[in-house]
Image (cartoon, grey):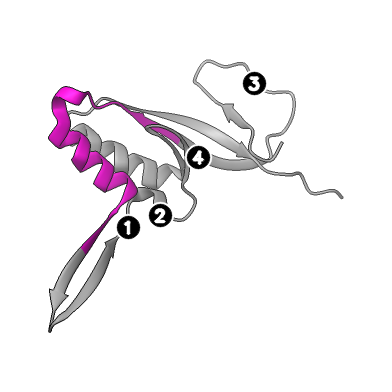
Amino acid sequence: MDNMLTTMRSGDEPWEEAIVGRRCVLVSWDVTLERRPLAVWVNRLVYGREETVEAGGKECVRKYPGYVDAPGVSRVGQSVLLMPPAIGAELAERLQARRIPCEVIPVYRRVAARSG
């Protein structure tokens, strides 16, 4: 069960077992096609981009990483990332600043329990 996710919403009853895992957040967002320029901005922000420039007669490719390239970030599905809480909060703040609907859900990413 290495990649099983366990949601921890407020109001849930306490668990009888200890959770062995890492605290993470699921961040999801939705940009409609009517807001195409904003969708392009989100794609570049989340997935990064490459730019080819000419410098001194040579072509040079500059890579600008996105949130998916950050340590501990995994793509779960379309418009859904699993990430450390601090990085997730930063991404959500940037999305909300542009009025992009998003949701941040705290989860635990289970890791294999160590035997005795």
Tell me which amino acid carries mark 2.
Answer: Asp
From the viewer's perspective, is the residue at label 1 or at label 4 nearer?
1
Q: Which residues are magenta?
A: 26-51
Q: Earlier in the sequence, mark 3 or mark 1?
A: 3
Q: Nearer the viewer, mark 3 or mark 2?
A: 2
Element class at badge 1: loop
- At 41% from the left edge and 54% from the top edge, which residue is drawn? 70
Q: Examine the rendering and report whether any part of residue 65 can be seen.
A: yes
Q: State the mark number for residue 14.
A: 3
36 in magenta? yes
- What's the amino acid at mark 1? Pro
In the rendered image, is residue 98 in sight? Answer: no
Q: Quadrant of the N terminus?
A: top right
Give the residue number, with chain letter if any, for mark 4.
24
Crowdedness near tag 2: few (<14), some (14–19) or many (≥20) residues, C-alpha within 10 Å: some
Which residue is nearer to you in this view: 16 or 49? 49
| Residue, disc 2 | 69
Distance Cα–Cα, label 1 vs label 2:
6 Å
